[in-house]
Image: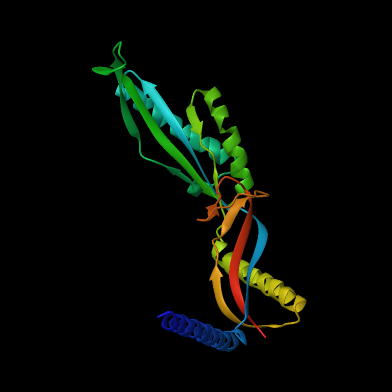
Amino acid sequence: MNGEKNGNLMNAGVALAIGLVMSSIIFGWFYSKTKKGDEAIAVTGSARKRIKSDLVVWSAGVSSEALQLAEAYRQTTESIPRVKQYLISKGVAENQITISSISTTTLKKHDEDGSETSEITGYLLRQQVEVRSNDVDKIAQIAREATELINQGILIESNSPQYFYTQLGGLKIEMLGEAAKDAKTRAERIADSTGNKIGAVRSARMGVMQITAADSTEVSDAGISDTSSIDKDVTAVVNISFAVN
């Protein structure tokens, strides 16, 4: 009985040993077949460029408040032409100025609990003045100074300008090309350090574009498109895998 048991154990051990040898042979064959000529280097290349916005969009709200709707309307229709004339006197072309339609808000009295009642206390009328211009520096200065109209009795609220770069399409192509060159240089240095050479591109993937305020270190997986700054940094990233010879 013990002899039979020992024989079974021996057979199992032999089978296991043979299995391990065969596995080693198969793995070695697979490794030799896939390793040779199949090595690759994956690198990330990047490029950065400083640009200046070439389009600014700035808006300001002009409002009038009065007990009677007609009076509020009269104030508004008098204020808007004065704002428009102010902008023209500062060098803004008339075709760069857009005036929105008037929005009306009925003001109502609130009770002791802060709840709105049906009693009308006045009317608030509001119009938006928007300027779109390629003269970025000039409009940026006007946006800072426009509140001086308050001294003329005009209720104006200046919004923060938005700055854009209109040649971004062509710039993206240029930047991706520079990022790809950077990736190739990095791959060549890695390959040279091991006595190899890089070959054809195996795969390439474009990362998201980061358009940030100048000298900003902010990044986002979804990409950033800053509109708050005149001067911006554009960063392009590509991930490329090169064959190794």
Residue occupying image coordinates x 68% and y 49%? 215
> Which quadrant, please, contains the C terminus?
bottom right
Q: How many marks?
A: 0
- Residue at screen point 64% across, 46% down: 137
**Viewer-proximal residue among 35 and 6:** 6
Closest to the observer: 56 or 240?
A: 240
Q: Is residue 149 above or below residue 135?
A: above
Quick check: can you spot residue 191? yes
Q: Residue furthest left?
A: 118
Q: Looking at the rendering, which quadrant does residue 115 occupy?
A: top left
The residue positioned farthest toward the front in the image shown: 1
Q: Quick check: 150 left or right of 104?
A: right
- In depth, the one of 16 and 153 nearer the eye is 16
Relative side of 74 to 222, left or right: left
Task: Name the colouring of the figure.
Answer: rainbow
Above or below: residue 60 compared with residue 180: above
Residue 26 locus on image (x, y percent): 53, 87
For residue 85, above or below residue 168: above
In front here: 90 or 122?
Answer: 122
Say if residue 54 shows up in the picture: no
Q: Quadrant where the N terminus lies?
A: bottom left
Q: Is residue 220 left or right of residue 75?
A: right
Q: Position of residue 200 (x, y in %)?
A: 62, 84
Percent coordinates x, y for residue 25 in the rendering: 56, 88
> x and y percent of residue 33 in the render?
57, 89
- Residue at the limit of the structure toward the top, as seen here: 112
In this picture, residue 92 sits left or right of residue 116: right
Q: Which residue occupies 30% across, 13% down?
A: 113
